[in-house]
Amino acid sequence: MAETFNYTPTNSSTKSKAPRVKKISFGNGYQQIYGDGINSNLEKWSVTFIVNHSDRCTIEAFFNARAGYEFFNWTSAEVGATQKQYLCPDWTVTPLGNQMYTVAATFEEWAGLV
């Protein structure tokens, strides 16, 4: 069973969506376009956390343990959001001084088999 990531990002975190589509162009100028599969409109979050040294270590250990390919559960801060499964393919850590850090990460919604 997947673990749950329980940190809440700052308000500057953003969600983006880029639906996958298939497009066929015909010689007479017509096109056919349709969704690419049943999970073609997944979320991608750019999240930012401002945390102390201890929490930075915990967050990095969590991401390192999943190595970008193991999913985890997370609930965004959106009103009415439900828990979904995500991957974290990349993250950066920026020291702010006084043992405070910014951790910026990408969360990509995962729709694979459990």
Image (cartoon, rainbow, N blue to C red):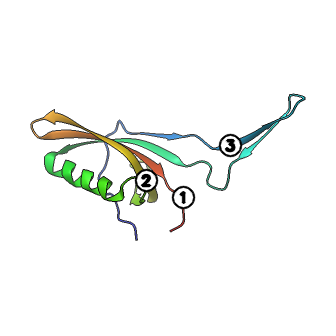
- Which amino acid type is marked by label 1? Ala
Residue 112: x and y in percent read 54, 61
Residue depicted at 50% across the width and 56% down the height? 110
Query: At numbered mark 2, what does the secondary structure look like: helix, strand or loop?
Result: strand
Q: Distance between the residues labelled 3 and 2?
A: 22 Å
Write down the residue under mark 1: 111
Q: Residues within 10 Å of mark 2 (few under 14, many from 20)?
A: many
Write down the residue under mark 2: 87
- Which amino acid type is marked by label 2? Leu
Among numbered discs 2 and 1, the one appearing first in the sequence: 2
7 or 29: nearer the eye? 29
Total marks placed: 3
Q: Residues within 10 Å of mark 1 (few under 14, many from 20)?
A: some
Q: How far apart are marks 2 and 1 (CA)?
A: 10 Å
Residue depicted at 29% across the width and 57% down the height? 62
Q: Quadrant of residue 46?
A: top left
Q: Are marks 1 and 3 in contact (CB under 8 Å)?
A: no
Residue 68: x and y in percent read 40, 52
111 or 25: nearer the eye? 25
Write down the residue under mark 3: 21
Among numbered discs 3 and 2, the one appearing first in the sequence: 3
Q: Do the residues labelled 2 and 1 touch (CB within 8 Å)?
A: no
- Which amino acid type is marked by label 3? Val
107 or 68: nearer the eye? 68
